[in-house]
Image: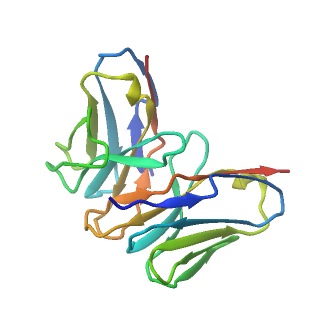
């Protein structure tokens, strides 16, 4: 089945630094979504990408849908302590059932 | 707005016991999903439903059953719990299939001893 490979697995950075994480797949995805999960809570949608090449920002977050439709990246600029959490990439594959396939997650820790 | 509500939040079971996890959404969403989250593995789809009265298997369905008798509720059952089912379970819903983003509940942490 379709799989997403997300990297890095974890990051430990200083407050104020920029962060970049990415997802790749061997197969094409129709959409790419980026979620954040805070401790003890469910994932919350950050950014949704629907077209190849699309570049979208949400505050300090920027994400892009790769032109080949097989990859996406998420950048966080000027990190702050509340950016701590697990970030997941996810994608809709070829079916029309709304099923999302998730990457393994990137755990971000920010040192004040 | 409640959104997606999961009950219970925590549960400890002994091997062989059974239980049902309840997911309720108040957004009139057609599609509902059950995922499990394990360290380093992301979220994996157990079962899903594309409408009231329908269910389908996901990526890791073995050992679980589901029912969608009412549009707003999606139940996940474990008939005979095993330690391998220790996990955090998330329910999600979306208004329709295709490319609609999923909305998640806050999870149920299940430990099977």
Q: Is residue B78 above or below residue A60?
A: above
| Image x and y of residue B107, in percent | 46, 39
User: From the viewer's perspective, is B70 left or right of A28?
Assistant: left
Q: Is residue A76 above or below residue B88?
A: below
| Image x and y of residue B76, in percent | 28, 36
Image point (22%, 50%), residue name: B71
Image colouring:
rainbow
User: From the viewer's perspective, is B39 left or right of A26?
Assistant: right
User: From the viewer's perspective, is A39 left or right of B29?
Assistant: right
| Image x and y of residue B40, in percent | 54, 44
Image point (40%, 58%), residue name: A101
Q: Is residue A102 visible?
A: yes
Q: Is residue B2 visible?
A: no
| Image x and y of residue A51, in percent | 44, 82
Q: How many marks?
A: 0
Using the image as rendered, state which of residue B6 and residue A32 is in the foreground. A32
Q: Residue furthest left?
A: B53
Q: Is residue B7 above or below residue A28?
A: above
Task: Tell me where residue A74 sits by quadrant.
Answer: bottom right
């Amino acid at each position: 089945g379709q799989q997403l490979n997300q990297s890095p697995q974890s990051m430990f950075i200083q407050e104020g630094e920029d962060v970049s994480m990415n997802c790749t797949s061997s197969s094409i995805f129709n959409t790419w979504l980026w979620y954040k999960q805070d401790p003890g809570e469910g994932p919350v949608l950050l950014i949704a990408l629907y077209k190849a090449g699309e570049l979208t920002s949400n505050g300090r977050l920027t994400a892009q849908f790769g032109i080949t439709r097989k990859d996406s990246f998420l950048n966080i600029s000027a990190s702050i302590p509340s950016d701590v959490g697990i970030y997941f990439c996810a994608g809709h594959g070829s079916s029309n059932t709304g099923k999302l396939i998730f990457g393994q997650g990137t755990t971000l820790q920010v040192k004040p | 707005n409640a959104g997606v509500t999961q009950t219970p939040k925590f549960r400890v079971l002994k091997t062989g016991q059974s239980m049902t996890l309840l997911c309720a959404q108040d957004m009139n969403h057609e599609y509902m999903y059950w995922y499990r989250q394990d360290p380093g593995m992301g979220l994996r789809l157990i079962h899903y439903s594309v409408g009231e009265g329908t269910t389908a298997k996901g990526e890791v369905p073995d050992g679980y059953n589901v029912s969608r008798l009412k549009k707003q509720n999606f139940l996940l059952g474990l008939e005979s719990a095993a330690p391998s089912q220790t996990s955090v379970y998330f329910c999600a819903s979306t208004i329709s299939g295709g490319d609609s983003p999923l909305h998640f509940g806050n999870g149920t942490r299940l430990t099977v001893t």
